[in-house]
Image (cartoon, coloured by chain):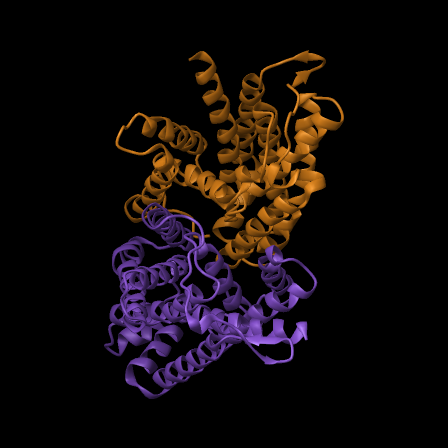
Amino acid sequence: MIAYAANLATLVAIFCILAATLNFIIGFAGIFSVAHAVFFGLGAYAGAQVALLLVPDALLACIVAAIVAGGLSLCLALPALRVRGEYFVAASLGLQMMATTLFAEAKAFTGGIGGLVAIPRPTLFGIEVGVLPLALVALALILFLTARLQHGAFGRSLQSIRDAESAAEALGKNVAAAKTLAVAFACAGAGIGGALFALHLSFVNVESFTMDQSVLIMAMVIIGGTGTLWGPVIGAIILLALPSGLAFLPFIPATEVGAVQQIIYGLAMTLLMVFRPAGLVGDLSKGRATA
Amino acid sequence: MLFLQLLLQGIQTGALYALTAAGFALIFGATRIFHFAHGTSFTLAGYAFLFCWNAGIPWWAGALAGIVAATLFGLAMERFVYRPIQRHEGSFFTVFVAAFGVAVVVQNLIGMFAGRGFAAVDTSLSRATEVLPDVFLAPIFWIAIAVAVVLFAALSAFLTRTHAGVALRALAQNPDLLRAYGLSSNRLSMLAFALGSAMAAPAAVLTAMTTGLNEAIGHHVMLISIAATIVGGVGSLRGAALAGLMLGVAESVALQFVDTQWAEAVSFLVLFAFIIFRPSGIFGVAQTR
């Protein structure tokens, strides 16, 4: 039971990292990406390769994962600089679908459909550690940074760009640099989440980085409330508790739990948008930003 | 002869893409609603047809059921999702997420009740015969092209010759002025949704007869529709149809060099290139927003 709880807590912490970083680009930068699982995956594969080929040092794995995911986030930043809103969603949708194929085919880096197996247990400076404390530290760090950025000059520039891009540009804000930085920060964070995920499960394959996963992360952010600090955390906890909760309902066959879960959060997304667009934690007095 | 075979195959796929994309472009152009559940209309139409076929109902009734399913779904989305959202604010983000939620729900419901994985109907129409040395064509090739040509001719006649069609184009250009002239933008918006969704149904039926459907095909359809709308130039039906055809041909011809699983990547690369180098598309004017 303790092992079960620890496992669930680790996954919750990792998904909180993912939701918090996605929230950073959606809520603060107004860049609507449906490709977050791509960077989660890049980080997971990079972290797994570090552990398999070099040393299973958690810190090194996280740093490499952050560099790989953050570096390749230019794939996302480039179209985001050229077009807004609708068009960018299409680009990120395409990126997600192409990356799934890439993950399944690039066997040298990802192990193909079979994935990477037998990833060694993580160590920190030579001592074996659990993933849970690492994930909690990483999450705390990311939330702290988000909170600092939210009220700092960079965060305010970002929010001004989100709300009125032309006006921000006219006031001398460097729109391209701010967006690129925001995307790089968020994707690097997703990469760290990926590395921790790989070290935790000691197995990764393409199944974890598909469109469905991106949608799940997006649902966490939206249900919790975009642009808030704690919304994504609450969204992640609710949505991860859902399958465990559903497993206790005897009338749902075990094979359909995944589908029922997706139906519930799909419905929740639609209903929230119709009746309460700011999300559960969102501030109702402020209207949502028009992306 | 492989090239010719792939080109013809691409034209067949492209004709179906063109129909679906034009439906999306019609809705988006007239109402400015980013109808992300358009792929769901396609999926529902395809599965309605499959269901009728397996129940032994004649093909024309099945196709009709597909069209009805797609149209009703489009209308329901307009009435129960988009209109309430637009009443309070209706940013792109809100509309997109709401539509996405519905798409996820329907995809999983279909997966639960109709089963997961590819399903297709097998007809004599989809059996290929050799028409030229080493070039194989099924009768469905001609059907797909005929359906696309007839529907596009009918649509352009409707948009230029009838009052409702002209009003629809006016709605795309200036909704406020349209209301000032006493026309109901709500009713026109429902018309756009009904027509646009119905356009996806024939493509879905023909897809069910050729490559087959799965419950997640909506994402692919959506990617193609949005890509075609952007590549063709937003606001241009002709552009969307042409771009749809082009994407189908590009995906197919690329198979000469890469394996089938990369077909989607080809569409994406075309879209990516257009977003970076020519965001306004082939026929588009410079975007103001």
**Which of the 4 image quarters holds residue B269?**
bottom right
The one of B96 and B124 positioned closer to us in this rendering:
B124
Q: Which chain is orange?
A: A
Task: Say if residue A174 shows up in the picture.
Answer: no
Task: Say if residue A190 shows up in the picture.
Answer: yes
B84 vs B30: above or below:
above
Q: Residue furthest bottom?
A: B161
**Is B55 positioned to the left or the right of A190 in the image?**
left
Where is residue A154? Give x, y as percent. Answer: 59, 39
Where is residue A131? Give x, y as percent. Answer: 57, 19
Total numbered badges shown on the rendered structure: 0
Quarter of the picture holding the N terminus of chain A: top left
The one of B163 and B65 positioned closer to us in this rendering:
B65
**Which of the 4 image quarters holds residue A69?**
top right
Where is residue A43? Give x, y as percent. Answer: 63, 35
The one of B13 and B100 positioned closer to us in this rendering:
B13
Residue drawn where x is 46% and y is 75% of the image:
B140
Where is residue A272? Give x, y as percent. Answer: 32, 43
A120 vs B188: above or below:
above
In the rendered structure, the colour chosen for chain B is purple
Q: Residue furthest right?
A: A54
A59 vs A125: above or below:
below
Residue drawn where x is 76% and y is 25% of the image:
A54
Residue drawn where x is 34% and y is 36% of the image:
A280
